[in-house]
Image: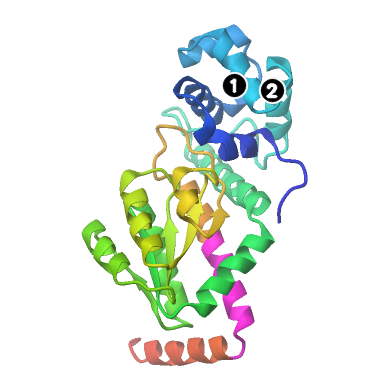
């Protein structure tokens, strides 16, 4: 599942929180305007990002490229291998027809899946499944839009296993975290892995000795220090694309893979549980 050659956008994901504030502006621009960047001079990119040319040069070297031209080549190679029509990529615009709009969104979602497929490590999936199978309780949590993903995970796992509970409110999350033990686990969703509420909460979780599985786009984010296992999802969100559907599609794929692995380990018990749940729910249909 993990590509042998890490492309430039994978490097950006891994290194984002080691960048300076000015370098993050460059990273945000490159992620948001991937196809435009490969045609820009270093002066153009610096001006677009509001930074000095020296900042762009340091940014390229921090990602282990010899210079700006090598970085641009890496961007060109990465965008050329992406799925979808290059002419129909990026954010929808007011001039798009409905077919063009659909194609752009389709390309964005399939890109997110392809990125996640490349970034998701089999050993991390296995380690996360080990934690979930051993846990007496699993609290599924997130904040904002990420809580929707936590609810999806809790719902799916509850069809086959007891003990998976979504916790919605941030205060209730803290209360629940304080009641955990070393026998329990937390499955937390955070695209950035860098919100204050997340870090405060995970500190409480670790004090109780519970295991933490973090689903994030940034494996070196501040929350990673509190996590036992990190499951990296794709979807390069720009600074104005908070909570994009593509990012959620990527997280849903991670949930699906993790659920399938846990069920595979617990056959035929998981199958029997799902059949009982299906029979019980069938009574609710007309």
* Vertical comparison of 91 with 103: above or below: above
Q: Give the numbered dot on residue 71.
A: 2
Residue at horizontal 68 percent and vertical 16 percent from the top: 68
| Magenta stretch contains residue 202 | no
**Which comes sooner in the sequence, label 2 or label 1?**
1
Q: In terms of image quadrants, where is residue 185?
A: bottom left
Residue 122 vs residue 183, the one in the foreground: 183
x then y, percent, for residue 56:
58, 16
Quarter in which the C terminus is drawn: bottom left
> Helix or strand or loop: what does disc 2 sit on?
helix
Q: Which residues are magenta?
A: 254-268
x then y, percent, for residue 100:
53, 37
> Helix or strand or loop: what does disc 1 sit on?
helix
Q: Give the numbered dot on residue 59.
A: 1
Q: Give the numbered dot on residue 45.
A: none
Quarter in which the N terminus is drawn: bottom right
> Can residue 1 be seen here?
yes
> How many labels sit on residues?
2
Q: Nearer the viewer, mark 2 or mark 1?
A: 1
Image side of residue 279 versus residue 2, left or right: left
Residue 33 vs residue 18, the one in the foreground: 18
| Magenta stretch contains residue 258 | yes
Image side of residue 135 versus residue 71, left or right: left
The residue most toward the right is 4
x then y, percent, for residue 175:
24, 65
Q: CA distance from mark 2 to mark 1?
A: 10 Å
Crowding at mark 1 (Cα within 10 Å: few <14, some 14-19, many 20+): many
Residue at horizontal 25 percent and vertical 57 percent from the top: 170
The residue most toward the left is 171
Cβ–Cβ under 8 Å for marks 2 and 1 = yes
Q: How is the image coloured?
A: rainbow
């Amino acid at each position: 599942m993990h590509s042998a050659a890490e492309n430039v956008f994978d490097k950006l994901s891994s290194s984002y929180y080691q960048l300076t504030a000015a370098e993050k502006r460059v990273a945000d621009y490159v992620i948001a305007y991937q196809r435009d960047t490969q045609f820009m001079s270093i002066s153009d990119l610096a001006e677009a990002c509001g930074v000095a040319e020296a900042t762009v040069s340091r940014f390229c070297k921090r990602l282990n490229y010899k210079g700006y031209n090598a970085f641009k080549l890496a961007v060109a190679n990465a965008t050329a291998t992406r799925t979808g029509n290059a002419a129909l990529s990026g954010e929808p615009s007011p001039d798009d027809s409905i077919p063009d709009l659909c194609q752009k969104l389709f390309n964005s979602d399939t890109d997110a899946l392809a990125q996640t497929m490349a970034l998701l490590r089999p050993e991390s999936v296995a380690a996360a499944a080990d934690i979930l199978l051993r846990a007496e309780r699993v609290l599924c949590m997130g904040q904002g839009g990420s809580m929707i993903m936590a609810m999806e995970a809790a719902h799916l796992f509850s069809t086959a296993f007891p003990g998976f509970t979504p916790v919605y409110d941030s205060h209730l999350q803290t209360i629940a975290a304080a009641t955990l033990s070393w026998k329990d686990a937390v499955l937390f969703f955070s695209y950035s892995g860098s919100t204050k509420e997340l870090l405060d909460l995970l500190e409480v979780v670790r004090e109780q000795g519970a295991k933490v599985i973090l689903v994030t786009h940034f494996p070196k984010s501040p929350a990673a220090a509190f996590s036992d296992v990190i499951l990296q999802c794709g979807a390069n969100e720009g600074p104005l694309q908070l909570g994009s559907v593509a990012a959620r599609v990527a997280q849903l794929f991670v949930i699906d893979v993790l659920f399938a692995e846990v069920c595979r380990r617990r056959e035929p018990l998981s199958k029997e549980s799902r059949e009982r749940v299906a029979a019980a729910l069938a009574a609710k249909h007309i």
